[in-house]
């Protein structure tokens, strides 16, 4: 009970200390590209998935954007699978309008870190997530006549993560992801969106993480379409386990090859 109250208190503090949090989030340049014209600057983000556009027939294999070289070492306490069921949103902007009224938004988020263990006990993860996340849902469209039409959809998401730095109980992540929304009736792409998130995560202990996030949204052309700031709590739902193979691909072999390229063969995991 005390730990739960502690977690809630830190969560509220993370959200309320907006000025200091924004200062932290502003450190470092996380923009992929910038188009300059006059006094305005437009942030541009290239989608992780290339060659797709709304209206095209969807082929799942086009989502494979992982490579054998995109490994990163992570803090031990971050390893495992984490889940969050809701966000406490402090601001949201879309099409030039900003809403600063705090609100709770139900939104399922899953994070998984850790695939391989080196000989010295260091835990390593893929910076490009080898798993394509699939969300089944429903989309509500509004016709020109003002009527609503519901469509069954699947959303396929790929994600790439980088760690800026970490301490004994904090880590700063910069992640980009691209989501492809597919109409299940026609199997055609109805929407493509990309997101870039800077996330400051604090380890509260007892398998609970508190996160302060700043996300910028981009449309299928890579142009900024909105921004939101929010906080959330993650609960660990699965402990770290070494995975040597995923969907028929040997991630162990990829990791050993990666260590060889670094000239760190001495870290090769024991069999």
Image (cartoon, rainbow, N blue to C red):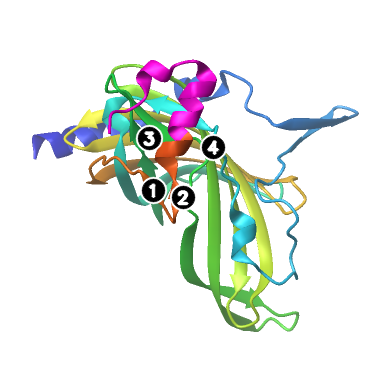
Nearer the observer, disc 3 or disc 4?
4
Disc 2 versus disc 1: distance between alpha carbons?
Answer: 5 Å
User: Does the residue at mark 2 contact the one at mark 1 (Cβ under 8 Å)?
Assistant: yes
Picture residue at 75% right of the left edge, 79% below the top: 144
Q: Which residue is mark 1?
A: 245
On the question of residue 50 being in view, the answer is yes
User: Does the residue at mark 2 contact the one at mark 3 (Cβ under 8 Å)?
Assistant: no
Q: Which residue is mark 2?
A: 249
Disc nearer the start of the sequence (3/1): 3
The crowd level at tag 2 (other Cα within 10 Å; few <14, some 14-19, many 20+) is: few
The crowd level at tag 4 (other Cα within 10 Å; few <14, some 14-19, many 20+) is: some
Residue 233 vs 149, above or below: the answer is: above
Disc nearer the start of the sequence (2/4): 4
Per the rendered image, the range of residues in magenta is 255-271
On the question of residue 114 being in view, the answer is no
Locate the C terminus by quadrant: top left
Residue 170 x, y percent position in the rendering: 34, 23
Residue 14 x, y percent position in the rendering: 36, 30
Q: Which mark is residue 68?
A: 4
Q: Residue furthest right?
A: 38
Picture residue at 78% right of the left edge, 30% below the top: 34
What kind of element bears circle 4? loop
């Amino acid at each position: 009970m005390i730990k739960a109250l502690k977690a809630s208190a830190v969560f509220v503090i993370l959200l309320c200390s907006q000025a200091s949090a924004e200062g932290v989030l502003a450190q470092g340049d996380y923009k992929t590209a910038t188009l300059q014209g006059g006094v305005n600057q437009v942030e541009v983000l290239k989608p992780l998935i290339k060659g797709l556009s709304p209206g095209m027939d969807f082929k799942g294999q086009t989502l494979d954007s992982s490579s054998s070289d995109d490994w990163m070492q992570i803090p031990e306490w971050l390893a495992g699978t984490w889940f969050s069921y809701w966000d406490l949103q402090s601001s949201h902007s879309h099409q030039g309008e900003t809403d600063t009224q705090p609100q709770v938004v139900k939104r399922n988020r899953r994070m998984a870190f850790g695939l391989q263990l080196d000989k010295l006990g260091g835990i390593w993860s893929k910076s490009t997530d080898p798993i394509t996340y699939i969300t089944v849902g429903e989309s509500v469209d509004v016709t020109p006549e003002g009527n609503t039409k519901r469509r069954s959809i699947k959303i396929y998401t790929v994600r790439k993560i980088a760690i800026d730095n970490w301490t004994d109980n904090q880590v700063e992540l910069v992640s980009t992801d691209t989501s492809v929304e597919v109409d299940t009736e026609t199997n055609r792409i109805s929407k493509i969106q990309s997101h870039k998130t800077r996330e400051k995560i604090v380890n509260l202990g007892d398998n609970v993480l508190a996160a302060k996030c700043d996300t910028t949204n981009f449309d299928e052309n890579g142009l900024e379409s909105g921004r939101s700031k929010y906080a959330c709590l993650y609960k660990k739902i699965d402990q770290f386990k070494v995975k040597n193979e995923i969907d028929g691909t040997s991630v162990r072999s990829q990791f050993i090859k990666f260590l060889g390229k670094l000239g760190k063969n001495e870290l090769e995991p024991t069999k």
